[in-house]
Image (tube, rainbow, N blue to C red):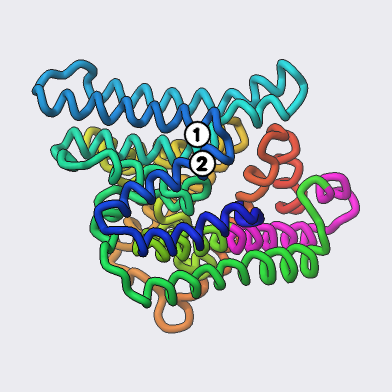
């Protein structure tokens, strides 16, 4: 998206117009601009998402105003979940039927993962009595906000409303442009030029698989560590641009990354990596399950299964989710073991940082599942065996 002239035109020209028009027109302008840009990218899916979300808000407004439940909120959330899962699984089904990947690309609405999670958030919180006074303009300006629509972060509505300013300040431009500049540097200089072209020398998961018998275990480890760093820089760059672009409209979007490569364990990693997804899953998956079962291990299992399936409905990302969940569960068990024996929560002084390379290695190992997404289990296991020296 950031490689297109239309995105930057909508961003910069749209921000200028936004602040020049009267205050009572700005929310409608932002929602209309976002809807128009999304429909420009994909008219059919854009219109379908806009109409579906409008119908959902109308239903919830009616139920709230008349105290008459037509559809219980749990069934709406289940329906949204099934809808997302169907679209996630549909590409694989179509590709197997037609043996042509272009059918799968046409089948999936753009930004569907972020969009559905925002809708689930809205439905649950609306059922809890929040957001009753919400206009369609404000609803769509949050739901369709085009700088974050396709690549996140998963902005929750209460944060959006609290951090949205109606008064222009020059600091918005300074902060927005600075953040966009940081994102562009991360993407095109650090991720693409330095890591991918220079350090990785253009190597990919496919080329690594093809040369698996000729590379050493150390070389495989270097590749997967660099692959993780590349994905981090690229994803963080898109988040920077999304956050900076939203700031030009006076909106301060939630942060998505906080130096995850410095995490000392897997629990801390998920407080630093894709923080908006982790916060959503903690709020709507982990907490409800732990409230019902009082078992943190069940909650961790289902939370990370959700995270894996959110990325893609296939065995690779299921294993990726379970792998990360196992890491977090191990940290939980180890911390419990230390508390029972009265041991300090962390090692003293510089020894406390020993967990950083261990965590980096663990996360990088998980790249065998994410990197082989769509390839099946066998390639992932072959790469895992190489990393283990087998």
Q: Nearer the viewer, residue 123 or 142?
A: 142
Dot 1 surroundings within 10 Å: few (below 14), some, or many (20 or more)? many
Residue lying at 64% horizontally and 64% vertically, measured from the top left: 187
Q: Nearer the viewer, residue 67 or 277?
A: 67
> Do we see residue 362 in this rendering?
no
Q: Position of residue 197 (x, y in %)?
A: 79, 65
Confirm or deny contact between disc 2 and disc 1 (CB under 8 A): yes
Among the 4 quarters of the image, the one containing residue 296? top left
Judging by the rendered image, the residue that carries numbered circle 1 is 46
The part of the chain drawn in magenta is: 207-234
Q: Nearer the viewer, residue 229 or 132?
A: 132
Q: Nearer the viewer, residue 9 or 111?
A: 9
Judging by the rendered image, the residue that carries numbered circle 2 is 38
Residue lying at 76% horizontally and 48% vertically, measured from the top left: 205
Separation of residues labelled 2 and 1 (CA atoms): 6 Å
Label 1: which secondary element: helix
The reply, left or right, for residue 135 in relation to residue 303 is left
Residue lying at 62% horizontally and 36% vertically, measured from the top left: 316
The reply, left or right, for residue 323 in relation to residue 4 is left
Query: Where 124 sits versus 138, above or below?
Result: above
Question: Residue 352 in magenta?
Answer: no
Residue lying at 38% horizontally and 61% vertically, measured from the top left: 249
């Amino acid at each position: 998206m950031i490689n297109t002239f239309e995105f930057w035109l909508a961003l910069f020209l749209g921000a200028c117009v936004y602040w020049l028009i009267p205050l009572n027109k700005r929310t409608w302008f932002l929602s209309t601009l976002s809807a128009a840009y999304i429909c420009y990218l994909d008219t059919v899916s854009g219109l379908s998402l806009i109409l579906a979300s409008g119908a959902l808000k109308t239903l919830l407004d009616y139920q709230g105003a008349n105290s008459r439940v037509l559809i219980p909120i749990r069934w709406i959330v289940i329906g949204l979940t099934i809808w997302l899962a169907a679209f996630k699984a549909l590409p694989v089904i179509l590709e197997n039927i037609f043996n042509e990947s272009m059918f799968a690309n046409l089948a999936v609405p753009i930004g569907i993962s972020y969009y559905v999670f925002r809708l689930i958030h809205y439905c649950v919180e609306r059922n809890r009595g929040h957001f009753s006074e919400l206009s369609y303009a404000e609803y769509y300006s949050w739901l369709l906000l085009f700088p974050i629509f396709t690549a996140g972060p998963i902005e929750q509505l209460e944060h959006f409303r609290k951090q949205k300013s109606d008064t222009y300040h020059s600091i918005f431009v300074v902060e927005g442009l600075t953040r966009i500049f940081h994102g562009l540097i991360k993407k095109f200089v650090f991720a693409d030029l330095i890591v991918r072209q220079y350090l990785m020398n253009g190597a990919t998961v496919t080329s690594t698989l093809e040369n698996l018998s000729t590379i050493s275990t150390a070389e495989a480890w270097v590749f997967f560590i660099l692959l993780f760093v590349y994905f981090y820089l690229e994803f963080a760059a898109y988040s920077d641009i999304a956050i900076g672009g939203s700031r030009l409209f006076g909106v301060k979007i939630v942060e998505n990354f906080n130096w995850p490569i410095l995490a000392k364990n897997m629990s801390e990693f998920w407080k630093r990596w894709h923080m908006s997804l982790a916060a959503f899953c903690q709020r709507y998956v982990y907490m409800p399950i732990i409230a019902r079962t009082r078992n943190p291990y069940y909650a961790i299992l289902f939370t990370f299964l959700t995270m894996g399936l959110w990325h893609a409905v296939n065995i690779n990302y299921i294993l990726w989710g379970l792998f990360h969940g196992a890491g977090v569960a191990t940290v939980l068990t180890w911390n419990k073991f230390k508390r029972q024996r009265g041991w300090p929560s962390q090692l003293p002084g510089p020894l406390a940082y020993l967990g950083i390379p261990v965590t980096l290695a663990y996360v990088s190992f998980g790249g065998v599942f994410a990197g082989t997404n769509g390839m099946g289990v066998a390639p992932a296991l072959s790469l895992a065996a190489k990393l283990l020296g087998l």
